[in-house]
Image (spheres, rainbow, N blue to C red):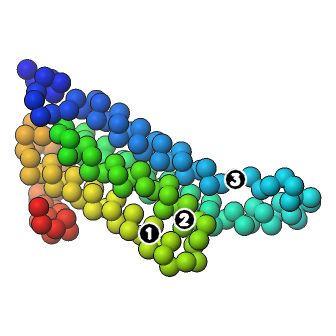
Amino acid sequence: MSDARHQPGYLPLNRSEALTDGIFAVAMTLLVIELKLPDQGLVHSADDLNGALLALLPKAFAWGFSVFVLALFWIGHHRVFAHVPRADARLVILELAAASLMPFSSALSGEYGGQLVSQAIYSTNMAALGITALLVLRHVRTHPELMTVISPWSRRLERRGAPAAIDAAAGPA
């Protein structure tokens, strides 16, 4: 039976992809919650509205940048999974925690952008996304049973020395 639903130790790939898509979609949606309309009681003129909208710029920048980052990681995740016909639990879980924290760290950065701790938390979240992406690549590479065919993508990575770079960046297994 080649269907992952019937193989012990593997998860159905369509369910894994749906969960990943859902986590990324919810995280991206939650990012926009920080962009609240100015309080109507405080806006009495066009100048008041302009001032209130200008005050939203740090949050808008944090939102835009975070959506862009999450979109890039989501695209990268799907590029990897295009060559993985089945998944195990570790492969699915690796990126989800870091992606789900983006709304919090983005809101913190947008609200307290001038504070070092808010930038440190946001940067740590970004680093966690990058590290988990590397761990996913290494996990796929070190578990050949997850790939039934060596893809042109994998061959290009091998020729470029990417496995050694991935292993070095991801740290000890």
Q: Secondary structure at mark 1?
A: helix
Can you say which quadrant of the picture contains the N terminus? top left
Residue found farthest to the right: 44
| Res. 127 image quadrant | bottom left
Report crowding for label 1: few under 14, some 14 to 19, many 20 or more residues within 10 A (C-alpha): some
Residue at point 20%, 32% (across, down)? 11
Residue 15 lies left or right of residue 37; in this view the side is: left
Q: Observer-nearest residue: 112 or 77?
A: 112
Report crowding for label 3: few under 14, some 14 to 19, many 20 or more residues within 10 A (C-alpha): few
Q: Which residue is mark 2?
A: 108
Q: Which residue is mark 3?
A: 36
Can you say which quadrant of the picture contains the C terminus? bottom left
Q: Nearer the N terminus, badge 1 or badge 2?
A: 2
* 65 versus 3 height, above or below: below
Q: Secondary structure at mark 3?
A: loop
State yes or no: discs 1 and 2 in contact (Cβ < 8 Å): yes
Residue at point 27%, 57% (across, down)? 132
Residue at point 62%, 55% (across, down)? 34
Q: Nearer the N terminus, badge 2 or badge 3?
A: 3
State yes or no: discs 2 and 3 in contact (Cβ < 8 Å): no
Q: Secondary structure at mark 2?
A: helix
Distance from the alpha carbon under mark 3 to that under mark 1? 22 Å
| Res. 61 image quadrant | bottom right
Q: Which residue is mark 1?
A: 121
In the image, what residue type sits under mark 2?
Leu
